[in-house]
Image (tube, rainbow, N blue to C red):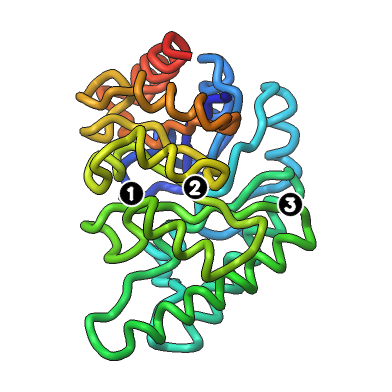
C-alpha cells in the first residue's frame, strides 16, 4: 500500500486538508516527508496549470493519487441530486472536466459530496435515479479515458445517504460499471460502521481508495481508532492502493504530515 496526503489549490473552509493555496509547496513538503502520492482537492481544473503540475510531480518524484471534487459542491453548489436539472447537468459536466484533467496523469476521480443528499419527500427515488444516471454517464466518459471513479461513503451528518459499505455496494449494483469502486474513509467509518474489519471484508474486491484518518479527524495516532485492525483487514482482501491522509493540519501542517506518515509506515 502507498501513502498520500491531501492538498488544495485554493484556500478553503473545508478543514481536513494538509496544505492549502497553491500546490507546489504542498507537493514538495509531502515528498520531503516520504509520501508516495498527493491527492488534490480541486474545485475546477481551470484553477491549476496542468503542465506545471506535471513538472512539479516529476521533480519531486511523487504521483497524483487522485482528484477530490467536493469543493464544487461546497463552493459552487453542484450535485447530482439537485432538483434543478440545469445544476445537475453542470455537476456532470464538472466531473467530466475533472476526468479529462485526471486522465493526463492516469489518476482516479473521487465523487463524494457531489453526489448530493436526498429529499425527504416523494422525489427521493427520483433523486436516486438522477444520481445513478449521472454516475453511469461519468463512468462511461471515464472508461473511454482509462480512468476509474471512486464513490466515497460519507457519514450521515454530511450527506443523508451512501453512508456505509452496505449502501455503497447496493449503489455499485445500480450503476453497474466496472470502473466504479468504493472509497472508504476511516473517520466516516468510525461513525457509521459497527466493525471496521467486517465492513472491509464485506467490500472485498470493491474498494478502490482509502482515506486513513483518526476519530477526531487528526492524523492517525492522535485519536482512538485501531489502525492495526484496519490495515490487517485491507491486507487480507489484497488491497494495494493508496492510503490517503485527509486530515486536519493540526497541531500544524508539517507536524500533521510528518507524524501521520510515520505512524502509518510503522504499521505497514
Point out the tag, 2 or 3, that comes first from the N-terminus.
2
195 with respect to 228 (left or right): left
* Proximity of marks 1 and 2: CB atoms separated by less than 8 Å: yes
Q: Residues within 10 Å of mark 1 (few under 14, many from 20)?
A: few
Residue at left offset 78%, top offset 58%: 145
| Disc number for residue 14 | 1
Q: Residues within 10 Å of mark 2 (few under 14, many from 20)?
A: many
- Mark nearest the camera among 3 and 1 is 3
- Mark 3 and mark 1: Cα distance apart in space: 25 Å
Residue at left offset 63%, top offset 48%: 108
Residue 106 vertical position relative to residue 250 in the rendered view, above or below: below
Residue at left offset 66%, top offset 26%: 62
The residue at which mark 3 appears reads as 103
Per the image, label 3 sits on a secondary structure element best described as: helix
| Disc number for residue 41 | 2
Give percent across and percent down for residue 113.
40, 60
61 with respect to 205 (left or right): right
Q: Nearer the viewer, residue 209 or 35?
A: 209
Give percent across and percent down for residue 51.
76, 43
Furthest toward the top, the residue is 266
Amino acid at each position: 500500500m502507498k501513502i498520500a496526503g491531501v492538498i488544495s489549490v485554493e484556500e478553503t473552509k473545508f478543514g481536513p486538508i494538509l496544505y492549502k493555496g497553491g500546490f507546489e509547496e504542498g507537493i514538495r513538503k509531502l515528498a520531503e516527508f516520504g509520501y508516495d502520492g498527493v491527492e488534490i482537492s480541486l474545485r475546477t481544473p481551470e484553477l491549476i496549470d496542468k503542465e506545471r503540475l506535471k513538472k512539479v510531480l516529476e521533480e519531486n518524484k511523487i504521483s497524483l493519487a487522485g482528484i477530490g471534487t467536493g469543493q464544487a459542491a461546497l463552493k459552487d453548489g453542484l450535485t447530482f441530486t439537485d432538483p434543478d436539472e440545469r445544476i445537475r447537468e453542470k455537476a456532470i459536466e464538472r466531473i467530466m472536466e475533472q476526468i479529462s484533467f485526471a486522465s493526463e496523469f492516469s489518476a482516479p476521480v473521487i465523487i463524494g459530496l457531489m453526489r448530493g443528499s436526498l429529499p425527504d419527500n416523494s422525489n427521493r427515488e427520483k433523486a436516486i435515479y438522477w444520481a445513478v444516471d449521472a454516475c453511469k454517464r461519468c463512468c462511461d466518459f471515464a472508461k473511454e479515458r482509462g480512468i476509474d471513479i471512486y464513490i466515497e461513503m460519507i457519514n450521515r451528518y454530511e450527506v443523508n445517504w451512501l453512508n456505509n459499505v452496505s449502501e455503497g455496494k447496493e449503489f455499485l449494483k445500480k450503476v453497474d460499471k466496472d470502473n466504479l469502486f468504493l472509497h472508504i474513509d476511516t473517520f466516516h467509518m468510525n461513525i457509521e460502521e459497527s466493525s471496521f474489519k467486517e465492513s472491509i471484508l464485506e467490500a472485498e474486491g470493491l474498494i478502490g481508495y482509502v482515506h486513513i484518518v483518526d476519530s477526531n479527524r487528526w492524523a492517525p495516532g492522535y485519536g482512538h481508532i485501531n489502525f492495526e485492525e484496519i490495515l490487517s483487514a485491507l491486507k487480507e482482501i489484497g488491497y494495494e492502493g493508496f492510503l490517503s491522509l485527509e486530515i486536519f493540519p493540526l497541531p500544524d501542517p508539517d507536524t500533521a504530515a510528518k507524524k501521520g506518515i510515520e505512524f502509518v509506515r510503522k504499521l505497514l
